[in-house]
Structure formats: structure tokens, C-alpha cells
Amino acid sequence: MKLRKVTAAAAAALVLSLTATACGGDDNDSDSADTGSGGGDKIKVGIKYDQPGLGLKEPDGSFSGFDVDVATYVAGELGYEPDQIEFIETKSADRENALARGDVDFIAATYSITDERKEKVDFAGPYLLAHQDLLVKSDSDITEATDLNGKKLCSVTGSTSAQNVKNDFAPKAQLKQVSTYSECVAALQSGAVDALTTDDSILAGFAAQEQYKGQFKLAGLKLSNENYGIGVKKGDTETVNKINDALEKMVSEKAWEKAVTDNFGPADYKNEPAPKIGNIVQ
Amino acid sequence: MFDFLSDYDDPSLLGAFWVTVQLTFFSAVGSLIWGTLLAAMRVSPVPLMRGFGTSYVNIVRNIPLTVIIVFTSLGLADIFGMTMGAPDDFEAQGFRLAILGLVAYTAAFVCEALRSGINTVPVGQAEAARAIGLSFSQVLRLIVLPQAFRSVIGPLANVLIALTKNTTVAATIGVAEAALLMKEMIENEAQTLLIGAIFAFGFVVLTLPTGLFLGWLSKRLAVKR
Amino acid sequence: MTSVLYDAPGPKAKRRNLLFSVVFFVLLALLAWWIWQVMDDKGQLRWALWEPFTQSEAWTTYLLPGLGDTLKAAALAMIIALPLGAFFGISRMSDHRWVRMPAGAVVEFFRAIPVLLLMLFANEFYARYTDVSSADRPLYAVVTGLVLYNASVLAEIVRAGILALPKGQTEAAQAIGLRKGQTMTTILLPQAVTAMLPAIVSQLVVIVKDTALGGVMLGFTELLNARGTLAANYANVIPSFIVVAVIFIVLNFILTSFAGWLEARLRRSKRSTGAVLGAEDVDELNAAEIGTPGTGKGDIV
């Protein structure tokens, strides 16, 4: 009898650990894509994974987008080959912390330079001037922000863009909040909302996606100025200067323009000319 | 140290927790009703209802709550047009959708708690009820469920505590409750730990007394056998 | 029990039950048809949205790595939380106040805090005071959060399971001169394990589901998080949610089925000392957590 009880307990324990190891078997190939040793010969760059045209993880595991191209060029100037770059996903809320902890060496992830952020991180650039804009259905009659009064607007929880519109331009707009922009685009497509607001560069990427082609248009409003900079750990002036040099070279070598055409071309996005380093448009 | 708290007044810290309390309250009532219906289905003589109850519980229990809540917003509201009587007021709509999602999810657990409660009612009770000619619904309504409810106050208390904490998921569809405010604060202030501690304390304040009170109640009301 | 709630149906009751079945079936069918229609109407059934899931890249690049992380975190959390839970559960029944009280405080405290917050704290802790690499940190934080919370829930399940055993077991053990530790390890625990299994399994399902919280703020690339990246690529938000939900259902179904099989085996292999522990026993102690009530007697899956 005693033996049986012990067997029972042992069987339970064994089986539990078996399940565990069986599950563990999946590990080996699961993290090869986005994690690595982080040794001295690699540079870790924070980007977005889910923004077509800016930073997107492609089905083949590679990364594409304007931010990615800029980051790759800058890393190249800092002395890292493309295969030495390790891209890491930095969600908006985590960008300052990721830099402070040293999880990433620099961040190129639709990172607007603001005074609040400048207290916590240093910025190189700007490397792109974007504007807050609206994405609407191609047959929509919304042409300016005040048209939004009484209309339904979508944005991502906690983002400042939606608050801007509600506070400054269209106080009577209804605000739907979801977790990611692709959910907003889905809501726009299904007709649940009338407009989606955030930076025009981000909107252009979604509008240009194969699946959405021809369905949406940008309203072309310049509701705010978003100066995209490259975030660097606070106090690391040396890297900031190096990145600034790299960005200047990127523009003068026309690589900047090529990156713009490659990534924003299909979206018919009327981008601003390359901004001057340190020239932050308020 | 706590100065930054006064910067937040829409909603304030207390206001956000008040929304949490409201979410908890309405979801609790809703899931109690829906969960009881599900439990009745699961023990009913109609095979198809039993099948539905069983599949409902087993499917819903196994999906992460986040997925269910997001579904209410992107699926029910956007695609199926169930705007919960507030097609033009996203704030009210999100709040009601969150309750709907929480009810759908929590009811599965209420159902299972009740079913195990039904199991604790001695067989003789149901047999005696049938012997005096009561129908299935009468047996359930008059004899079994009243006893079952008393014996499952404990389990239901645990469901309630979990529900209180689960309301934080409503933040994913923009309901302005405690977790959303916390996210906002963490994004604006550089004091993750302090902010986290404040909100953790808030939840302890909400859940500990509930647990203790209902624990006491379940001992008082327990059917002595 | 359920069968004693109603008499064996006679001809009239059979007819009535049939009628109910038909009505219920028609209602369900109408609902299903309506759902299908609306989905079709809104273009959610277009093949373009579902096609990615028939291609290997959607799986190898997004879903499988995500599933791998989910399983890794869940498995680690289970392995650590089970013994830790047993430890706290037993400590809470100790004869010594200085063992009992701290164990009780730990259990009550960690049960009251949302898991997401525990993960957040753990992440900050590892970032500040340890040199865990940034790539591994989210996993560490997620596992830590899951362990702290679930170990305290499991502790209560273990405690309830042991207390539910007939008192005679302890007394008989003492009578033949076993020490307290021996009584626990050789008499009580082995019996309690069988009885607690359904409640434990429900908690394991909770662990699997709660890994999804790691993607919300820590950037842990579990299944739900990977879904977001996938949907950004293929512009198929609704289908991707449905697929991920199905994966979770299948995963947890396998877990619970396996536990059901295990429990049946364990029960056959021993002369039972009592019923399987249902939620009512656990909760007598105001114990479990969502998930544990989901265990009626002998109800698994």
C-alpha cells in the first residue's frame, strides 16, 4: 500500500516534469530570431515590429521600413555590418526604460523628440519630420479636424495623438481606444470608426499595405510636428554626435532619399524634406 | 514623493479605482446570473443544453481573458454592431463591453463552482423532492440550488477576488480604470516601482477585506451536516 | 448526482425533451448562421485574410516562436510553482507559529495583487539588482510573477487537500510512531496529490493563460504578442485573434485531458481514501483562485 502511494506521487511528479521538458523542447529554435548573446561585436537597436513602412517584422523574419533603413545606415557608420545588428522590439511605453537599462544601444522607433523625453534620454537627429494626421476611407468627406466633431475617432490607448484632437481640434469627437494601430485600421475598415489619428508616416504605411490598397486616404492635415529622433542613453553625447554625423552623411549621400522612396513611395506619402540636424520644428 | 498624484484628475486615483469597483460589481451580478443559468443547463435533462453548457465552459475557460475582452470591442461592437445601447458614446460602450466580456468569462467559473456545490447537496434531498412530485426546475429552484449556493460562498468569493483583479484587462479596450491610469502614470513619470506599489496597495485594499468577509460569511451560512 | 435531479423520462417527458432540444438547436443554428452572415458581410471570411495561416512563414516567423515562449514560461512557472506551493501550503499548517504566520502572510499577500503588477515589479528588480541579460529578462520577470502568484494559490490547494484527508490517517501514522515529517511525506502528501489533481490542473491552465500578460507591458514575445506582429503584416486582426484563441483552447484541452487520464489512473491504482477534492473543500479555506472553482467532483475537461 505504501509503495502504491509513493508510486502515485512519483508518477504525478514524473509526468509533470515530462510535460515540462516536452514543452521545453520547443525552445531551441524559438528565440534565435530576436535574441542573442549581446556580445561586444553586436549592436542592439530598438525598433517597432508592427508598423508597416517604418518598422515591420516580415514573414521571412527580416525587418523592413524607414526606421530600419535609417538604423541600419547609422549602425553601418558606427562600424557595424548589417549582420551585426540585433533588432529588438521597443514598444512606445518602454522606450525610455529600455535605453536607461541599456537593453538597446539606440532606438529608431517613431520616437518624437519632446521636452519631457529629453529629460530622460538624449536624442540624435531629427531624421524625419512627420505630422499628426487622419486616415479616413477614400470616399470620406472629412477634410479638416473640425469635421471630426460628432464623428468616431480611433487611436491607441494612452497615445497623445488622440488627446490632441479631442482637446484642441474636435472636442465632440468620440474616441475609441485599442491596443495596436492594426486594430484601429481594422475598425476603420469595418466602418466602426470614421477616422484614425496618429503620425502621417505611420498612417501612410498602413494605407500602402497590399490588403488595404485603395481603401484609405490621408486627410493631409498637419495637426502637429513630430520630429523623429534617434534615442540614446542619457549623457552619451559621443554616440549622439556620431549618429548625427551619420545622419548628415546619409542625407548628403542620397541614401536618405532612397530610403524614403523605398518605404514611403508606394504610399503616395508627401514627406517633408530631410530635416537639419538639431533643427526641431515646434 | 507622492506629488505627481495630484496631476491626475481625469480620472483621479480614487476615480479610477471607483471604475474598477463598478466594473467588478456589475460583472459579478451578471456572471452570477449567467453562471447559474449555465449550471442549470449543465445538469438539465435536455442533452443538447447539457452539451452547450459543457462546451461553453470548456471553451471560454481556456481562452485568455485579454482575447475575450478585445473580441467584445473589435468583434461584437465593430463587426456585429452590438453597441450596447451606446453607439455614439465610446466611453459607455467600452465600459459595457468590458462588463459583457468579464461576465462571459467569469460565468464559466461561477458555473463550475455552482456545479460542485450541487454535488455537495446530499442525494437524499433531491430524491425526496422528486418523491413528492416536484419537476426538474422545481427540484433545482426550491431544493438544490438554495443549499448549493450556501455551500459555494467560499468558491464564489475566490471568483469575486479574481474578478476584481481581472478588471485590469479592461484597460486594453480603453476603459479608464485603475490599470489604465497606472499605465499612463508609468509612461509619464519615471517611478515605475512607486506607482506599481500604489496600485498594488489599492488592489490589496479591495480584495483582502472582501475575501475575509466572505470567508466569514461562508462559515456562518454553511449547511451543517 | 445530476441524474437524481430528475426522473427517468417517460414518453411524455421524452417528447418534451425532444421539443426543447429541437428549439434549442434551431436557436443555436440561427445564431451560428447569423454570425457567419455578418462575418461574410464584413469581409472577414475573405480567403486573403485566412490564407497566411496555410503558409509556413506565418507559423515559423510569428506563431511558433510565440507559442514556444508561452510554453517555456508556463512550463518553468509550473515546475517552480508546484514545489514552492507545496512548501508554503505545508508551512502554513506547521505547529510553530513563527513558520505558520510568515507563510500565511506571504500567501495572502501575493494572492491579492494582480499578476501583471508582480511581473512589472520583477522586471524592475532584475533590471536593477541582477545582471540577467536584457534578452532573458522578460522571461525571468514573467516566470517570477507567475510563480509568486500561483505558488500561493497552489499552497492553499495543497493545504485544503491535506486537511480534507480523514483525520484517522494522521492519527494512525502517529500511533505507529512516525515523526511529523514522515507522516507528511509518506502518508498525507501522496494521498492528497490524487485528491488535489483537478484543482491543481485548473491552476496550471491559469498559468498557461496568464503568460499572455507578459506581452502587455514587458515585451515578452509570447503568443498574443506575436499575434500583434503577425496582424500588422497580414492585416487580419480578427482572424488572427480567432486562430490564437483556438491554439490556447487546444493547448489547455490537451493539458486537462492529460490530467483527466492521469487522475483516472491514479484513482484506479489505489483504494480510495475519499473523494477527489472539489472546489468546495478548497474554498472552505477561502483558498483558491479563479480556475480552481472550475473543478467539480470528477469533472475534468
Image (spheres, coloured by chain):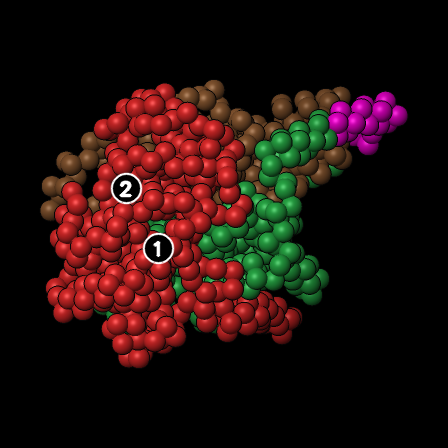
Chain colours: A red, B brown, C green
Q: Is residue C88 visible?
A: no
**Nearer to the camera, C270 or C24:** C24
Residue B119 versus residue A77 in the image, above or below = above
Residue drawn at x 44%, y 43% is A207
| Residue type, mark 2 in image | His
Q: Earlier in the sequence, mark 2 or mark 1?
A: 2
Q: CA distance from mark 2 to mark 1?
A: 16 Å
Q: Is residue C19 magenta?
A: yes
Residue drawn at x 42%, y 62% is A63
- Could you say which disc has been placed on residue B168 in the image? none
Residue drawn at x 60%, y 39% is C44
Q: Is residue A37 left or right of residue C11?
A: left
Q: Position of residue A56 (x, y in %)?
A: 42, 56
Stretch of the chain drawn in magenta: C4-26
Q: Is residue B112 magenta?
A: no
Residue C276 versus residue A35 in the image, above or below = above
Q: Position of residue A185 (x, y in %)?
A: 45, 40
The residue where tag 1 is placed is A260
The residue where tag 2 is placed is A131
Label 1's element?
helix
Q: Nearer the viewer, mark 2 or mark 1?
A: 1
* Residue at the extreme right: C11
Q: Position of residue C40 (x, y in %)?
A: 64, 35
Residue C198 versus residue B133 in the image, above or below = below
